[in-house]
Image (cartoon, rainbow, N blue to C red):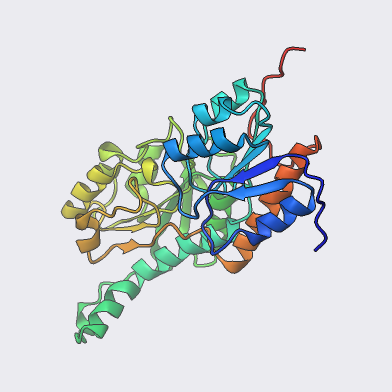
Amino acid sequence: MVVNTKQRGTVLLTDYAWPDAEVERGIIESAGYRFITGPSAPAPETDIDELVSEHKPDAIMTCWARVSTRAIVSTPNLKVVARVGVGLDNIAVDAATQAGVLVTNVPDYCVEDVSDHAVGMVLAWSRGLVQFDAEVKSGRWNPAAARLRRMSTLTCGIVGYGRIGRRTAEKLRAFGVRLAALKHSGISRDEPVEQMELEALMRQSDVVIIHVPLTEQTRHLIDARSIGWMKKGALLVNVSRGGVVDTAALIEALAGGHPSAAGLDVLEEEPDVPDALKAHVASILTPHVAFSSESSLQELRVRSSEEVVRALRGEPVHYPCNRPVLAAS
């Protein structure tokens, strides 16, 4: 690869959830920009603040690390903060907007992967795959204990009917399930999806799948009250953000069988997993990997890096997430 040695500015990658940052480095440096990285694991907010203050980057790319208001206002040349992912809950978007800084993301890179993960959790629960695998490996062979479910008899409610929610519904439809989604979700008339208010959806669904981003409006959207509406024996799946579900309320509800199981790829305090969830044999826990596959990660890394280059060159970006306030002339 030929690298443009006349550097036009600095791009800081705060952290990354893969073995190295060479894909990002190749794209950024070949466009003529200096590329530096923080530690691969997300550092505390104060460490990121110091890193930004030290290097005063023209662009910040972040995977999981928090990009604070202080970080944004401390670097006068900052033009863009790019989320290497979908959700924006780790970026001070309002501060960026007021500072005239563009915020971008890659909202559609993992649609197939997250929807696959959600459907996989439903299948694993309905057929008892995780529980029976553990029992057989521990020496127990007891098919008479099976309390399995036929997919085509299930009602699956989807909370969050955007790109991923819609794709999850399409995949579940192949199993003949009854599908429901929240009202006012942009469902077209020709889609075989029933529209319900949250209470009706929670009460009628055998499976509830969460696909909403984490915002002030959705934090603890699934709380003690809404969990209490769920059927005895139902499944709650969360492949969006941990903070959408009140973990303490869920743990208490699981003990009473409303719902009887949870499929969780995300938690409120990652990577800390409450002992009660680890001990719950009917639940399925994965370490925030629903977005991940070789294909999705390659796409994410390339597209987020290219988006930064576009922003720094003053070209239109593909996925702007805010409307930066223009600086006074």
- Residue at 26% across, 47% down: 250
Total marks in image: 0
Q: Quadrant of the C terminus?
A: top right
- Residue at 62% across, 34% down: 56
From this view, report whether residue 56 is shown above or below residue 134: above
Indicate the position of residue 206 as horizontal and vertical percent values.
35, 56
Does residue 36 show up? yes
Indicate the position of residue 32 as horizontal and vertical percent values.
79, 47
Does residue 192 show up? no
Furthest residue in direction left, as rendered? 256
From this view, report whether residue 197 is shown above or below residue 174: above
Residue closer to the observer: 112 or 38 = 38
Left or right of 43 on screen, residue 306? right
Residue closer to the observer: 173 or 92 = 92
Residue closer to the observer: 123 or 229 = 123
Indicate the position of residue 44 as horizontal and vertical percent values.
41, 42
Left or right of 276 on screen, residue 42? right
- Residue at 39% across, 44% down: 201
Residue closer to the observer: 18 or 237 = 18
Q: Quadrant of the N terminus?
A: bottom right
Indicate the position of residue 97 as horizontal and vertical percent values.
61, 24
From this view, report whether residue 230 is shown above or below residue 314: below
Furthest residue in direction top, as rendered? 329
Left or right of 96 on screen, residue 149? left
